[in-house]
Amino acid sequence: RQQIKGENQDVKPVMGTDEIMKAREIVRQVYLDEKIEQYIADIVFCTRYPDKYGLKEIKDYIEFGGSPRASINLALAARAFAFIKRRGYVIPEDVRSVAHDVLRHRIGLTYEAEANNVTSEEIISKIVNKVEVP
């Protein structure tokens, strides 16, 4: 919190470097079932080929979709979310919970989308609501 007088406050770390590195390793060990991996791949693939998932209406709004790195980062974020929820495994709701944050900047919108005030948030919502949940 900033103070009006401009005085410096002492900041006390809540976690050290070693603890952060240990938490990162634990997150990477969170179990991700093959069905969840496929679910993640389907979501990202749908950002590139929405018509193959029955979302032809958003195809003209997407200039480019998520890359393979989007899949990797979506899986990692879902693992981290499961870890925060104190679970050693990922469930579809973990993926859905982080999908917007991970994919928001990975979907390029067309001029048509901008002209129609369509946001990447709306596109991601349509995708996660359409892709079959395992």
Image (cartoon, helix red, strand yellow):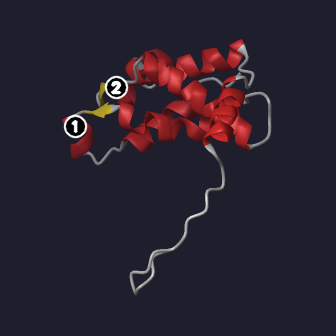
- Residue lying at the far bottom of the rendered structure: 5
**Residue at (65% x, 37% y) in the render:** 18
Pointer 2 residue = 59
**Mark 2: secondary structure:** helix
Is 54 or 131 nearer to us in this picture?
A: 131
Quadrant of res 3 = bottom left
- Res 112 label: 1
- Tell me if 74 is positioned left or right of 59 in this view: right
Is 133 or 76 nearer to us in this picture?
A: 76
In space, the residues marked 2 and 1 are separated at their CA atoms by 11 Å
**Mark 1: secondary structure:** helix
Kindly identify the amino acid type of the residue bearing the numbered disc 1: Glu
**Residue at (48% x, 35% y) in the render:** 102
Q: How many marks?
A: 2
101 above or below 92?
below
- Res 99 label: none
Q: x and y percent of residue 14 in the render? A: 66, 55
Q: x and y percent of residue 73 in the render? A: 51, 27
Q: x and y percent of residue 103 in the render? A: 45, 34
- Tell me if 88 is positioned left or right of 45 in this view: right
61 above or below 2?
above
